[in-house]
Every structure is written in structure tokens, then in C-alpha cells.
Amino acid sequence: MAVVDDRLAAYAALVRKWAPRLDLVSPGDLARFEERHIDDSLRAVSLLDDLPAGPCVDIGSGAGLPGIPLAIARPHRRWTLLEPRRRRAAFLDEAVRELDLVCDVVAATAEQAARHPALAGVHVLATARAVAGPEAVRGLADPLLAAGGVALLFSGRSAETPADAEEWAPGLTIMRKK
């Protein structure tokens, strides 16, 4: 666990270093980055552990949330970090390299990625945090998910869960691909 903690601390330091130049997170969140962002991202570890083997994708990765903390916590999983903004994608490349993560950074939208044969229909999990509401996330995630894959939306603790979705934990909504 110490190795994971060290890597999470190194990740937080990278975000703090680059955030002012790239607007990675709000300036007010930097002092509480671990609590507000990393710990929140790690709430999905138990879901990740329940899924079959296979790659995962983080849609609209931005600062790498939740993909990078989950890749650190479960290094045996391959992650694709989708980020259409080039400067943020460059930050993600740097973070993946410095933290020695099993991640691919793709500077593309989810819609663009879904047209790529190596990315379409292959992921067991698609995550989205601060991207869109449940129906929009489902539309972005489904083309990237394998049959039976799960879209995980960090929805906020008071968000309404759609009829065909499940609340995995407070503020975590899952939608299964049929």
C-alpha cells in the first residue's frame, strides 16, 4: 500500500505543479486535492475489482480523474485516458510517463475514439467524472464498451439515478451495456 500512496502523492504533486498553467482543477481545490479528487476517484476501486479482466477508458480525463488514481490503485488494468484538449493530453502523457502507468493517452473525444477499431467496443469499464449527465454519458460510453461493460458516472451525491441505472454508491451511478 505504501507504493500506491507514494504514487498517488507523486500524482498530486504533478497536478499541483501543472494546474496553474493548464487549469486542471479549480485553484481552491488544490489544497484539498487528495480528499476532493483522489479519494473520490478511488471510491470506484471495489467496482473495478468486481469486473472481469479487460481494459478501461476514462472519458474526458482532464487532469486524469478518475483514471490515473484507479490505474495507480490497480496497476494490472490497462487504461485509455481520453482527453480532446491537447495541452491537457500532454499533461496526461507526462503523468503517465513519470508515474510509469499502464495507460494510453488519446487526444480525442469519445465520439472520435468510438470510430477507432482498437477502441470501439472493447472496454469493460468507461468512467466519466464532471463530463455530462447520465444519458449523455451512456451515449458516449456505449460505443466504447464491450458487451456487458459498465459505464460509471461520478454523479454527485444528490443526483437522480435514471430508471435503468443503478446507484453503486452515493454519487456513483452505473449503467450496464446490454
Image (spheres, rainbow, N blue to C red):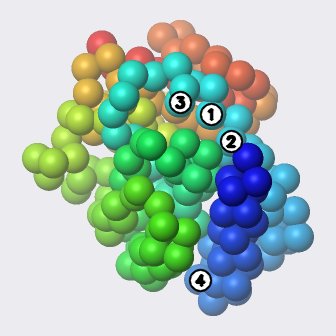
Q: Is residue 135 shown left or right of residue 158?
A: left
Mark 4 residue crowding within 10 angstroms, few (<14) / some (14–19) / many (20+): some
Q: Which residue is mark 1?
A: 45
Work out how far the residue at label 3 is from the one at label 1, CA to CA, in angstroms: 5 Å
Frontmost residue, 29 versus 96: 96
Mark 2 or 3, nearer chain start? 2
Please identify the residue farthest to the bottom as the structure is shown. 21
Cβ–Cβ under 8 Å for marks 2 and 1? yes
- Amino acid type, residue under disc 1 in the picture: Val
Please identify the residue farthest to the left as the structure is shown. 117
Q: Which residue is mark 4?
A: 22
The mark found on residue 42 in the picture is 2
Q: Quadrant of the C terminus?
A: top left
> In which quadrant of the rendered view does residue 87 lie?
bottom left
Residue 170 to residue 137: above or below: above
Mark 2 residue crowding within 10 angstroms, few (<14) / some (14–19) / many (20+): many
Cβ–Cβ under 8 Å for marks 2 and 4? no
Work out how far the residue at label 2 is from the one at label 4, CA to CA, in angstroms: 23 Å
Q: Which residue is mark 3?
A: 48
Work out how far the residue at label 3 is from the one at label 4, CA to CA, in angstroms: 29 Å
Residue 34 to residue 150: above or below: below
The residue lying at 24 percent from left, 35 percent from top is 122
Cβ–Cβ under 8 Å for marks 3 and 1? yes
